[in-house]
């Protein structure tokens, strides 16, 4: 949960807050244009996933704005990636995570921006244009939240544990049998509810104490998880592969991730991995 706080002193947050705010406005404008039925460009990538004029416009703005405050390279879903393995430190960006949610007129899309140093994410931003809010993980200290409507800053505080575990799932999970198996095994360990939402929005809901465990069995890319992992690690949670290892970034030939388990705290990690172990015994 978050409580009202004084504005941040962190120089990077102060530089990025207006950039992220403007990027959110760009995506809100594009979303309203799309939902109103106006002319709107949608293309298919080689992997058959959609990309829209909103993705490209947000990407162009953020890339230009970052270049004015930093000389670090940018690895973006919508940009060039050929030289990335030569970069010891760089920005990692998904300018519109949840394009499918956007196209289904569900405002659960996010902007994911993080700073990767070596293999680790050291700074992160997750912004939710539909809610006019952004979550920042500074290089030191607890995550901060910006309410763009009021300009109010808030700081993360651990909330009271809910009596019922909440599991975050993507809407598409209902078509994939691994999720039904996982939930069946989890039900042998605890009572739980399900929170369905797309994109990295589920990571934001973990910070808001609305999701405790987020299992993922279908593909993501590094720009989908880096910011969320950083924010969760800062509050005592995390994101690990199916062998319990935290994700490392920009260390492989592919940017595709394997499956993962994200968790809000150590207790939820133990529970989530117990359910995964039960599931793996079946196979």
Image (cartoon, rainbow, N blue to C red):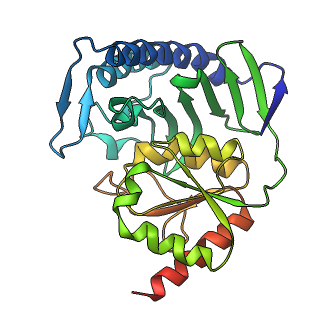
109 over 190 or under it: above or below: above
Residue 49 drawn at (x, y percent) = 23, 41
Q: Which quadrant of the figure has residue 101?
A: top left
Query: x, y (%) of residue 40?
Result: 24, 17
Residue 268 position within the rendered picture, expressed as x and y whole percent measured from the top left? 69, 65
Quadrant containing the N terminus is: top right
Q: Is residue 153 above or below residue 142?
A: above
Farthest residue, direction left: 46
Residue under the point 63% across and 43% down: 205
Does residue 175 appear to the left or right of 42 in the view shown?
A: right
Q: Residue at x 46, y 75 (%)?
A: 181
Q: Is residue 8 visible?
A: no
- 113 is higher (above) or lower (below) than 151: below
The quadrant of the image that shows the C terminus is: bottom left
- Left or right, 283 with reference to 210: left
Task: State the residue at coordinates (52%, 37%).
Answer: 115
**Near-viewer residue (256 or 189):** 189
- The residue depicted at 75 percent of the width and 21 percent of the height is 153
- Between 186 and 153, the one lying in front of the other is 186
- Which quarter of the picture shows residue 76? top left
In the image, residue 13 sits, relative to residue 64, either above or below, namely: below
Q: Nearer the viewer, residue 264 or 75?
A: 264
- 144 vs 217, left or right, is right
Residue 102 in view, yes or no: yes
Q: Nearer the viewer, residue 104 or 74?
A: 104
Query: What is the number of callouts on the image?
Result: 0
Horizontally, residue 44 falls left or right of residue 88, namely left
Q: Position of residue 19 (x, y in %)?
A: 52, 15
């Amino acid at each position: 949960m978050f409580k009202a706080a004084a504005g941040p002193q962190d120089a990077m947050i102060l530089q990025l807050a207006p950039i992220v705010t403007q990027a959110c406005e760009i995506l809100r404008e594009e979303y309203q244009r799309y939902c109103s039925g106006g002319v709107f460009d949608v293309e298919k990538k080689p992997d058959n996933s959609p990309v829209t004029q909103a993705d490209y416009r947000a990407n162009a703005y953020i890339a230009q704005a970052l270049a004015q405050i930093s000389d670090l390279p940018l690895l973006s879903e919508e940009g060039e990636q050929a030289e990335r393995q030569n970069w010891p430190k760089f920005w990692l960006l998904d300018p519109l995570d949840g394009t499918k949610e956007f196209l289904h007129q569900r405002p659960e899309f996010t902007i994911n921006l993080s700073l990767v140093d070596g293999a680790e994410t050291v700074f992160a931003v997750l912004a939710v244009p539909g809610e006019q809010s952004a979550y920042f993980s500074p290089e030191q200290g607890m995550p901060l939240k910006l309410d763009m409507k009021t300009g109010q800053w808030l700081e993360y505080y651990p909330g009271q544990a809910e009596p019922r575990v909440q599991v975050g799932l993507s809407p598409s999970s209902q078509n994939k049998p691994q999720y039904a198996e996982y939930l069946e095994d989890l039900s042998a360990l605890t009572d739980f509810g399900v929170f369905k939402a797309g994109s990295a929005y589920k990571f934001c809901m973990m910070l808001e104490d609305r999701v405790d465990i987020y299992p993922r069995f279908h593909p993501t890319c590094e720009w989908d998880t880096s910011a969320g992992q950083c924010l969760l690690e800062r509050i005592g949670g995390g994101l690990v592969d199916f062998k319990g290892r935290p994700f490392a970034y920009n260390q492989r030939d592919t940017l595709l991730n394997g499956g993962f388990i994200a968790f809000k705290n150590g207790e939820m990690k133990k529970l989530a991995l117990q359910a995964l172990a039960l599931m793996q015994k079946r196979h």
